[in-house]
Image (cartoon, rainbow, N blue to C red):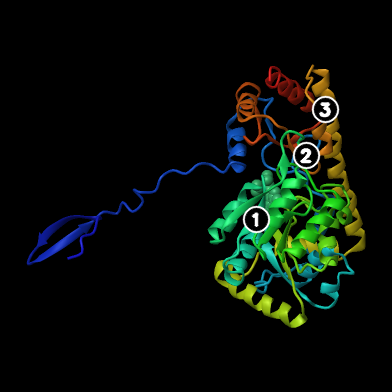
Amino acid sequence: MIRSARLISSVKFGQKNIRQFSTNWWANVQKGPEDPILGVSIAYNKDTSPSKINLGVGAYRDENGKPYVLECVKKADKKIYEANVDHEYAPIVGVAAFNQLAAQLALGEDCKHIKEKRIATVQSISGTGALRIAADFFARFLKGKTAYVPNPTWGNHNVIFADAGIPVKSYGYYNPSTCGLNFDAMSKDITAAPEGSIILLHACAHNPTGVDPTTEQWKKISQICKERGHFVLFDFAYQGFASGSPEKDAAAVRMFVEDGHNIALCQSFAKNFGLYGERIGAFSILTESPEQALNVESQLKILIRPMYSNPPVYGARLVQAILKDKELTNEWRSEVKGMADRIINMREQLVKYLKKHGSTRDWSHITTQIGMFCFTGLTPEQVDRLANEYHIYLTRNGRISIAGINSTNVEYLAKAMAAVTKDN
Ligand code: KET
């Protein structure tokens, strides 16, 4: 007889022995840690201090510290409501018109792959979902390859690839002594990666460092990837958020495509359209021929169907309504620029107040870094002091989401940062 650990007793019932099993299925499940980023919001929500500040998760806040609903989104919302749409299933690949517009926004309307139908695009559950599809697709069709991610990178990258069964390694990226790019390490490590490796690049506004390669450096990386036959995956979660111009922010992606890379691309519309909770994104693979694109698309469908069948439609409808309408697109452009500009302004204010409060450190990286985040160089202990003594919450790697700063809290933050960094 096979003995079951769950067998707790055996009782006689007439002639028969009735075995009784424990219903305690989950005794071996240990409590796991909170997510390093989303856990910060949990700690912040528990804090009852009126001066508390959440600089953890990368979610844009307006001057009053409130979530910001873009005007163009409100108008698109109204249009959708008035169109009296139904709530049928989308196809497995999502809303076709959205997919087309998303790819165009990233790659440009003149992109050859789009014109020649050499691209497969599917709607995804925001940027994370796009990465997840990417990882599962690579596990199936780029078997045995290792993915290389920058050190440091958005923490979820490592987990997404690992969960898909893809080995993950990192390439040098950040130089803590300059708070800038370690281009030497980056190019050396990408060169040293086995031929045909998967190289993940942040298209712009690198998370968590806020440090992007220059145009010249991008050119060299593209060259190295070509020489080594690497496959390039761009994570594009901040288009428009870095410089305020969606085109400028797309420069690296478009350069790689121009250089002849058949890249894969993960897009998120969470930050640039303020559609965090709508979970709207796109995943594209650029191919050699229209036939290949169709083959790839068919396999993406086979992969998606058992995962979540087909994606939710609402976010796609919103983005589509904006990007297909010239006026709404222009309004979006000015709103995304407004968000980027406010962030740039807050960087300047923070440095100004750090000086005012007597900090003699070199904080110039706060203004040279770009995008939603600043990698401050604060130690985990200093981060803990900010939380415990000042009710200011950020991730323990010292990353600040600049979007959480506003004119009301910037001086308080600077004062606290100056205090915790005073003697070291
Ligand atoms: N890529 C990068 C580089 C990234 O920073 C995020 C989100 C995503 C993809 C995924 O975003 P989505 O909401 O799935 O479209 N980053 C912020 C939020 C998070 O961690 O979930 C953050 O770093 O705070």
Left or right: 226, with 326 as reference point: left
Q: Quick check: 113 above or below 395?
A: below
Image quadrant containing the N terminus = bottom left
Which one is in front in this view, the residue at disc 3 or the one at disc 2? Answer: 2
Local crowd size for mark 1, using a 10 Å CA cut-off: few (<14), some (14–19), many (≥20)? many
Residue displayed at 64% across by 36% down: 397
Label annotation for residue 148: 1
Which one is in front in this view, the residue at disc 3 or the one at disc 1? Answer: 1
Label annotation for residue 180: 2
Q: Where is residue 375? Give x, y as percent.
A: 72, 37
Q: Where is residue 216? Give x, y as percent.
A: 87, 52
Q: Where is residue 158? Give x, y as percent.
A: 60, 52
Residue 391 versus residue 16: which sits nearer the camera? Answer: 391
Secondary element at tag 1: strand
Residue displayed at 80% across by 77% down: 117
Residue displayed at 77% across by 59% down: 224
Which amino acid, by three-letter code, is at mark 3?
Val
Label annotation for residue 351: 3
- Judge whether residue 319 can be spotted in this image: yes
